[in-house]
Amino acid sequence: MKRIVIPILSLFFIGCGDDPLPKPKGYLRLEYPDAVYEKANPSLPFTFEKNKLAQPISKIKVSNNAKGIDVKYPGLKATIYLTYKTVSKDNLDSLLRDAQNLTQKHTIKADEIAYKDFENKEAKVYGMLYEIGGDAASQSQFYVTDSTNHFLSGSLYFYAKPNYDSIYPASEYLKKDIKRIMESVRWKE
């Protein structure tokens, strides 16, 4: 009897350990190279610095008194669309309103819209950066102007259905590039 009871009791004590726990969820770790910036000098009345990770700027689009260029990031499946318009004494208010309204169109899908003023008095560049949280089509938008001659707006879009959790790392990486664009804009006179 002892021969049977002792092995059964020993199995009982050995087998009763910690309760099994499920494995924690794994998260995708995306690492992007450190940004290296170079001067972009498009055939437009401004220059700026862009990340070398972006494709070279090749084509200028023209429509409705606006000129635009695309800063494409094929590896991130994203593009920063830049649109330039000339300021006249009558249109600055409408340009500002249009830029702000474009951002407000994303409130349907956005969880939040945070904004930051931007000012570089020395270079005469003033503007606003909008960071859009949630499953909105655009994660960042901005505009800069000198208030007298130049107005530049930009929007970040991904070539994918907006899923905030999935595009968040790339969005954060590209927000740094957008800030660099704003900081490095210089108007050509």
Image (spheres, rainbow, N blue to C red):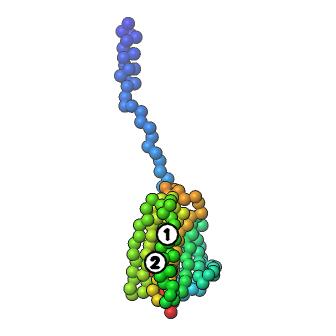
Q: Could you tell me which residue is drawn at 60 percent across and 84 percent down?
A: 65
Amino acid identity at mark 2 = Met
* Contact, mark 2 vs mark 1 (Cβ under 8 Å): no
**Considering the image in quadrants, where does the N terminus appear?**
top left
Q: Position of residue 15 (x, y in %)?
A: 40, 24
Please state if 141 lies on the left or on the right of 122 as rendered.
right
Q: Residues within 10 Å of mark 2 (few under 14, many from 20)?
A: many
Above or below residue 36? Residue 67 is below
Task: Tell which of 147 and 183 is nearer to you.
Answer: 147
Q: Could you tell me which residue is drawn at 50 percent across and 61 percent down?
A: 108
Amino acid identity at mark 1 = Thr
Q: Please give the residue where the numbered disc 1 appears in the rendered image.
A: 103
Q: Please give the residue where the numbered disc 2 appears in the rendered image.
A: 182
Q: Position of residue 121 (x, y in %)?
A: 38, 85
Please state if 85 lies on the left or on the right of 130 as rendered.
right
Tell me the quarter of the picture where residue 129 sits: bottom left
Task: Tell which of 144 and 167 is nearer to you.
Answer: 144
